[in-house]
Image (tube, helix red, strand yellow):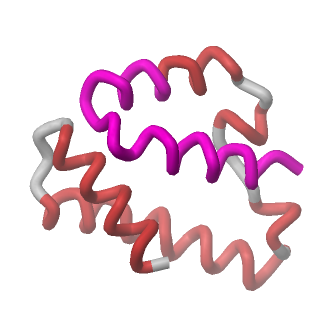
Amino acid sequence: LVTLVKLATDMWQSFGVSQQQATQALLPLLRGTLNNIDNVGIPHCLTGPIARGDSGTIKKHILALQRAAPGILSTYRELGLQTIP
């Protein structure tokens, strides 16, 4: 989990956000996600473009990562593939 948060803050830094700001912005999301996993289980708490089947948003994410954080792109793709139910 720590490694995933580091990757997320690295990505935010590539967009000009400090690591501290990124961490503070992500903490509520992380806490909510862990709470949802505890309360309803992994299959029922997935949200976001993959859960919605929103390929347009996923394509935008990939394009943004190609420009700003290409080193994270392969991880984004692999995590996305592992997320698909």
Measured as percent of width and height from the top left, residue 34 is found at: 61, 78
Q: Number of labelled discs?
A: 0
Viewer-proximal residue, 9 or 34? 9
Q: Is residue 75 magenta?
A: yes
Q: Residue at x 33, y 35 (%)?
A: 70
Quadrant in which residue 39 is drawn: bottom right
Considering every residue shown, the one lying at the far top of the view is: 56
Q: Is residue 36 magenta?
A: no
Measured as percent of width and height from the top left, residue 75 is found at: 51, 50
Q: Mostly what secondary structure, the magenta segment?
A: helix
Q: Residue at x 75, y 52 (%)?
A: 83
Q: Residue at x 17, y 48 (%)?
A: 13
Left or right of residue 80, residue 39 in this image = right
Quadrant in which residue 33 is drawn: bottom right
Q: Residue at x 86, y 62 (%)?
A: 44
Measured as percent of width and height from the top left, residue 10 is found at: 25, 55
**Magenta-colored span:** 61-85
